[in-house]
Amino acid sequence: MSGRDMRARRSRPATRTRQRDVLVHDAPIDAVLIYDGDCGFCRWSLIQGRRLLPAMPAVEAFQVADLAGYGLTMAQASAAVQFVPRGGTPVAGHLAVAGVLMSQPGFGWRLSGALLTVPPISWIAALTYRWVAGHRRLLPGASDACAVPVGAGATGGRPRGPSDGFITPASKE
């Protein structure tokens, strides 16, 4: 491919977007990501993942998920995001993020995910995840529920954001 063809290819972001959309639908990750459906920041993060990553696992709010079926407890699910590969062991927090990245079709994404599991990067990733989880009420997309203990939300477990296709407490009723 000539340099001219490469430049022309780079100047078509709409094509790249369409190709990414196809990858999202044609190359799903055979896993489930369990998240806090009441947390606006968590929902915002998932939307960004869908926008940026070539593939995403199914996502389900822990408030409506069959946690026992995934091998999880309410305490685990409410403490951190959970990545549950089909037939595999659930991983939480920064390791859940690593699981999503290591399941991507591209080598760069997989390498990024693998690095999140190796010390000293894994130590920094774990600390960063804990800090973000503890301060999510201050981050983009945050809702009132981000600062409220699980089960004490003023909306009775209903998500506060617009419908985005995720399984949430309100969409299961």
Image: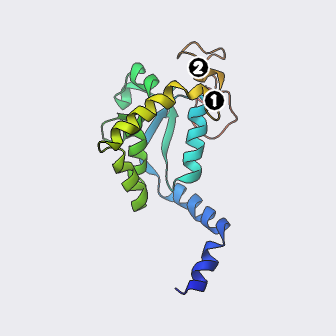
Scheme of colours in the image: rainbow
Q: Position of residue 79 (x, y in %)?
A: 44, 24
- N-terminal of the two: label 1 or label 2? 1
Viewer-side residue, 161 vs 124:
124
Q: Position of residue 77 (x, y in %)?
A: 43, 26
Above or below: residue 142 compared with residue 56: above
Disc 2 secondary structure class: helix
Mark yes or no: residue 72 visible.
yes
The disc labelled 2 sits on which kind of residue?
Answer: Ala
Q: Residue at x 64, y 79 (%)?
A: 8
The disc labelled 1 sits on which kind of residue?
Answer: Ala
Q: Residue at x 68, y 32 (%)?
A: 161
Disc 1 secondary structure class: loop
- Count of numbered tags: 2
Viewer-side residue, 157 vs 42:
42
Check the picture and name the quadrant holding the C terminus: top right
Whether residue 130 sits left or right of residue 37 in the image: it is left
Above or below: residue 79 compared with residue 21: above
Residues at marks 1 and 2 touching, judged by CB atoms closer than 8 Å: yes
Residue 70 marker: none
Q: Residue at x 37, y 31 (%)?
A: 70
Residue 147 marker: 2
Residue 142 marker: 1
Q: Residue furthest bottom?
A: 2
